């Protein structure tokens, strides 16, 4: 009872954050951009909280529980990609001082059609990721609070909808700061408690099948490398991350925050995988999907258990809120408002809040209809990196091209990814995301050269 009370208090705080933030929102610019005054630590913590969602935490623990350490090692691709972005691409945001969305950047670089297409695909990608997070939080609340997964999903969605709908990006970033603090302390503490409970690392390892410690374990090297590249590129420069890169105080401080976030992710992925392996070694559950929450409930004392339950809820909510805001801002600010410039500030704000609410409800349907978190994430990736990543990275590096170049490369990348995954059924175990990005890059630079 004490533990549930702690979780409920934490959730109430998040709701109050959103309601308070909503009082400061006067127009669409306030809702979508907050302000460009965020320093290194805020960028670092907000970015980290945004990407460490259900797939990269409880999903990673479940994958380690079932299949071993391989998924966590493939996730290193994401962290390395973040470091690369911080070093080589973030300085390019100085070229877009007046843009606060991905579509805005690509509209400046390539033209209005690029902005519109980016807005649509931003929405599709982010809505899919939110769906994955909602499924995760349904499972988490089921394990932690004793409600059904469906009720858990509805609770999580309701909380996120309140503070994102009313408070916009400013409330999301403030909530991220709270959530990051909990997850950065809570997850290592849980793993340490599990190791102590199990009598040490060596004793726990002796309880595990040897194949769980192999990076491949059923995957071919080509399939593992493909997954590594998919993780590196799949979410790279996704809307919520790009939003944070565009609202940093200076490109230099933003670049540092991005690099720190990538570095932080590497041990975090190992920690969450270790939690899944510890849950299996300690026999706390037979269900991979609930490995992390069941470990919390089994080995921790009252009170501390409640704090760790709140930390786990934080992980899921922190990714859901950023991607929900990214979906809303992408669709409204990049796909709708450019063709309706005469809407009043009040109408624009009402539209943003309505779309945010509708998108959250749609994400619940995704979560209830698609049963696997990683399947949802990979589907969402197919709407982003094969379409947007190459032109966006090129724009940040100072490359300029025409609308036609952008549209051709986006179309080729998307169709190639779709055909590879659905018609050809991923030959050699290679995910279509990697193939789509490659096709996009070839088309982009050949078309640019031909039209120069």
Image: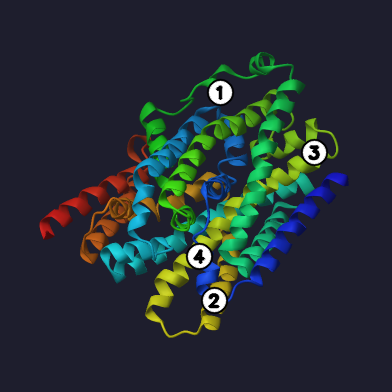
Say if mark 3 contacts mark 2, CB within 8 Å.
no
Report the residue at 54% width, 36% height from top.
264
Between marks 3 and 2 in the image, the one whose residue lies nearer the viewer: 2
Counting residues from the start of the chain, the first of labels 3 and 4 encountered is: 4
Report the residue at 57% width, 34% height from top.
268
Circle 3: is it few (<14), some (14-19), or many (20+) Cα within 10 Å? many
How far apart, in angstroms, are the residues tagged by discs 1 and 4?
A: 44 Å
Counting residues from the start of the chain, the first of labels 3 and 2 encountered is: 2
Task: Quadrant for residue 110, please give it.
Answer: bottom left
> How many discs appear?
4
Instruction: Check disc 3 and report the residue beneath it.
Output: 305
Circle 2: is it few (<14), some (14-19), or many (20+) Cα within 10 Å? some
Say if mark 3 contacts mark 1, CB within 8 Å.
no
Between marks 3 and 4 in the image, the one whose residue lies nearer the viewer: 4
How far apart, in angstroms, are the residues tagged by discs 4 and 2?
A: 10 Å
Task: Quadrant for residue 205, please give it.
Answer: top right
Instruction: Check disc 2 and report the residue beneath it.
Output: 27
How far apart, in angstroms, are the residues tagged by discs 3 and 2?
A: 41 Å
Give the x, y percent position of residue 271. Answer: 61, 31
How far apart, in angstroms, are the residues tagged by discs 3 and 1?
A: 28 Å
Counting residues from the start of the chain, the first of labels 3 and 1 encountered is: 1
Residue 29 versus residue 200: which sits nearer the camera? 29
Q: Secondary structure at mark 2?
A: loop
How far apart, in angstroms, are the residues tagged by discs 1 and 2?
A: 52 Å
Report the residue at 74% width, 21% height from top.
196
Residue 212 badge: 1
Report the residue at 56% width, 62% height from top.
169
């Amino acid at each position: 009872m004490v533990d549930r009370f702690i979780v409920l208090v934490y959730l109430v705080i998040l709701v109050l954050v959103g309601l308070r933030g909503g009082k400061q929102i006067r127009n669409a610019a306030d809702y979508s951009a907050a302000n460009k005054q965020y320093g290194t630590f805020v960028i670092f913590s907000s970015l980290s909280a945004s990407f460490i969602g259900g797939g990269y935490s409880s999903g990673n623990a479940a994958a380690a529980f079932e299949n071993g350490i391989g998924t966590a090692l493939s996730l290193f691709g994401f962290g390395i990609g973040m470091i690369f972005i911080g070093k080589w691409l973030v300085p390019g945001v100085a070229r877009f001082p007046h843009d606060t969305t991905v579509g805005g950047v690509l509209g400046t670089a390539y033209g209005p059609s690029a902005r519109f297409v980016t807005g649509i695909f931003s929405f599709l990608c982010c809505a899919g990721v939110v769906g994955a997070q909602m499924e995760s939080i349904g499972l988490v609340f089921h394990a932690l609070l004793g409600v059904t997964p469906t009720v858990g999903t509805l609770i999580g969605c309701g909380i996120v909808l309140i503070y994102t709908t009313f408070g916009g990006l400013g409330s999301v970033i403030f909530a991220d700061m709270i959530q990051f603090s909990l997850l950065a302390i809570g997850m290592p503490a849980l793993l340490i408690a599990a190791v102590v409970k199990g009598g040490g690392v060596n004793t726990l390892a002796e309880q595990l099948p040897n194949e769980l410690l192999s990076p491949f374990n059923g995957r071919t090297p080509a399939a593992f490398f493909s997954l590594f590249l998919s993780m590196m590129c799949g979410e790279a420069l996704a809307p919520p991350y790009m939003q944070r890169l565009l609202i940093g105080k200076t490109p230099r401080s933003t670049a540092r925050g991005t690099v720190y976030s990538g570095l932080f992710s590497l041990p975090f992925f190992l920690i969450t995988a270790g939690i899944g392996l510890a849950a299996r070694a300690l026999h706390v559950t037979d269900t991979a999907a609930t490995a992390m929450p069941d470990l919390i409930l089994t080995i921790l004392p009252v009170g501390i258990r409640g704090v760790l339950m709140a930390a786990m809820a934080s992980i899921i909510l922190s990714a859901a809120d950023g991607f929900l805001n990214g979906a809303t801002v992408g669709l409204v600010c990049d796909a709708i408002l450019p063709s309706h410039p005469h809407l009043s500030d009040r109408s624009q704000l009402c539209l943003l809040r309505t779309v945010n609410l509708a998108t959250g409800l749609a994400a619940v349907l995704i979560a209830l209809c698609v049963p696997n978190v990683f399947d949802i994430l990979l589907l969402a990736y197919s709407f982003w990196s094969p379409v947007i990543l190459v032109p966006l990275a090129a724009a940040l590096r100072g490359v300029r091209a025409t609308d036609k170049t952008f549209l051709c490369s986006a179309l080729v990348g998307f169709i190639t990814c779709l055909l590879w995954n659905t018609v050809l059924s991923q030959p050699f175990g290679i995910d279509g995301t990697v193939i789509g990005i490659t096709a996009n890059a070839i088309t982009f630079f050949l078309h640019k050269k031909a039209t120069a």
